[in-house]
Image (spheres, rainbow, N blue to C red):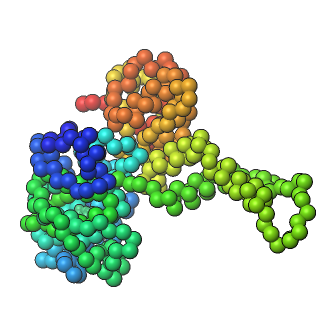
Amino acid sequence: MTLNNFNVELFLRDYWQQKPLLIRNALAEWSNPLEPDELAGLACEPEVESRLVVGAQGSWAVEHGPLAEARFAALGQEPSTLLVQAVDHHVPEVAALLAPFRFIPNWRIDDVMVSYATDGGGVGPHFDQYDVFLIQGHGRRRWRVGQMCNDNSALLPHEELRLLTEFHATDEWLLEPGDILYVPPRIAHDGVAVGDNCMTYSIGFRAPSRHELITSFADDLVSEMEDDDRYADPGLAAQTNPGEISAAALAALHEMVTEKLADRNAFAKWFGAFSSTSKYPEIDWKPQESVEAAQLQSWIANGEPLTRNPASRFAFVRQDGGAVLLFVDGECFETAGEAAAFAELLCAQDAMIVDPDLIQSDTTMTLLVQLYNQGSIAFYQED
Ligand code: SIN
Ligand code: CO
């Protein structure tokens, strides 16, 4: 699947992280990959994150999933929007929507959220911290985009929806199925369904905050520190004023902190694991029966395709000398040689036929067995 009327280089140069872009008829052969009933079914599952927003301009009420099946039948005439996160984790046809956006690194991708709205439904004017591609999947939605916001932008006193008090529209479009609207972080936007059965697929990205980078990296570093790793001052010079924290002491103390934070290798290992941790790590995707290498070898020899779990996150970091650190679902695998080449391939494609020669590679087979047994990959017999 590729995007029509879209040039990756121009988009990255002139729009990404800068300004909204409407891509008309981006998906020409578009066919809606999900039925509203299936979406409603997901919203009833306890492990799926979902929200139901009922009401329109001025009075929005939010309910959190899992929703009871009866809730949908009880919805009255008021406009409503059902929003379900990470539908790509559960529906391969929705995961396939990520394919045209793979020019952006895996670690920046968050999930595909799907919304279903009745006529007039919407979540109100707001801004998000993240980039998003809004694919119009079914029905029509009027999108308005507006001003650049920040943490000081005035919000309505609403407990859960971060609704803007002011909205200064700069553009307005009516999106039809197959159209895509890109909205950069912090740009005000407001989408209202025009007619019933309005489905929107949001390809959402993520960007770590400095706060979470520092706190999480520091947490990781301190977990390995010894109690006797302490400040020491042999050769201490007598001080004229005992109240002074000397420049020399401060320099040594500061060095104790920055030396650890500046360790690039430790940072790369930590960040790979941190950013590849799955969005919902509490969901157990392990296979019912774990396998040994012989089983995988026979599947590979039979040409059965390997598929990545759409809920899994794959990334790698190149190291000196051709070694590769592969990160999958928070686990780090140190690979070299054939296994390193395979690790890179696995990060580039969400499905593949494994080269049968790799059956002979013990390191690759060990890697595959671990990935299979942790639920990050599967092998499917094509019918
Ligand atoms: C929606 O799909 O209705 C809302 C998406 C968004 O504004 O972020
Ligand atoms: Co939004």
- Compared to 258, does 366 lie above or below? above
Location of residue 200 by image quarter: bottom left
Instruction: Please count the marks in the image.
Output: 0
Viewer-proximal residue, 144 or 149? 149
- Compared to 282, does 332 lie above or below? above
**Left-right relation of 61 to 4:** right
> Residue at image x 62%, y 48%?
262
Location of residue 190 by image quarter: bottom left
> From where the camera sits, is residue 50 visible?
no
> Residue at image x 45%, y 31%?
343
Q: Position of residue 312 (x, y in %)?
A: 41, 45
Viewer-proximal residue, 106 or 41? 106
- Compared to 314, does 295 lie above or below? above
Task: Locate the N terminus by quadrant.
Answer: top left
Q: Position of residue 275 (x, y in %)?
A: 47, 49
Viewer-proximal residue, 383 or 101? 101
Viewer-proximal residue, 221 or 358? 221
Location of residue 67 by image quarter: bottom left
* Ligand 1 rendered quadrant: bottom left
> From where the camera sits, is residue 13 visible?
yes
